[in-house]
Image (cartoon, rainbow, N blue to C red):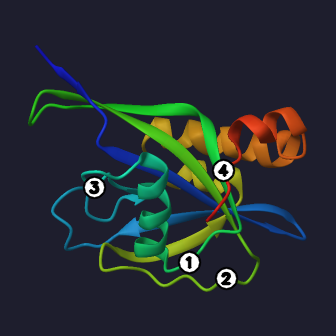
Amino acid sequence: MATLISTMVQVHVARRSASGTEHLVLQRSASEAVAPLLWQCVTGRIKSGEQAAQAALREVQEECGVKPEEFWVLPTISQFYSASDDTINTLPVFGVVLRSGSPITLSHEHQDYRWCSMEQACDLLLIPAQQRATEVFEDLLLHRANDPAFRQMYSIEIG
């Protein structure tokens, strides 16, 4: 019987520009054992004793070298099945907004990055749950970010 686990986070990175919202997509290094060259959002493991939100901020810092200006819980989850260990993995999904012009410094896990429109990001992202979460984040940033009730439910203060 498959086991349900939640040991990872998924984090979508965006910035606002004069032309609208841009989403960051990262290309995994060719030397990575799992999914080399895959275009993805920030993903990573939750360390022992760490809360998911803490892991999300840490992963953004480790994989992109940046500190976000805004931090959101996205009202969606990501799931995938791993045949290698017979687990169903459920990931909380977060979104961060960077200041325009924030330099990206990639970790060894990634070899390239692109700032894209939502449509371009979804074309590069092969994992359907990451595509859907990109669309959810775009909707949040364009239509819900200034709603006080929504902000109270989904915005997280950065310490």
Could you tell me how far apart the alpha carbons at marks 1 and 4 are, in whole angstroms? 17 Å
**Residue carrying label 1:** 66
- Name the residue type under label 3: Lys
- Is label 3 in contact with label 1 (beta carbons under 8 Å)? no
**Alpha carbons under labels 2 and 1: distance apart:** 7 Å
Question: Which structural element holds mark 2?
Answer: loop
How many neighbours does mark 2 have within 10 angstroms: few (below 14), some (14-19), or many (20 or more)? few
Left or right, 4 with respect to 33, comes to right
In space, the residues marked 4 and 3 are separated at their CA atoms by 20 Å
**Image height of 139 relative to 117, above or below:** above
At label 2, the amino acid type is Ser
Distance between the Cα atoms at labels 2 and 4?
20 Å
Q: In the rendered structure, are the residues bearing label 2 and label 1 in contact, judged by CB atoms less than 8 Å apart?
A: yes
**Badge 4 element:** loop
Q: 69 above or below 74?
A: below
In the image, 39 versus 144, the foreground residue is 144
CA gap between label 2 and label 3 equals 27 Å
Instruction: Check disc 3 and report the residue beneath it.
Output: 47
Where is mark 4, residue-wise? 156
Labels 2 and 3: the sequence-earlier one: 3
Asked whether the viewer can see residue 41, the reply is no
Is 2 in front, or is 134?
Answer: 2
**Measured Cα–Cα span from mark 3 to mark 1:** 20 Å
* Residue 22 placement (x, y as % from top left): 72, 63
Q: Residues within 10 Å of mark 1 (few under 14, many from 20)?
A: some
Q: Which residue is mark 2?
A: 102
The tag earlier along the polypeptide, 4 or 3, is: 3
Q: Residue 10: where, in percent of width, then height?
A: 45, 49
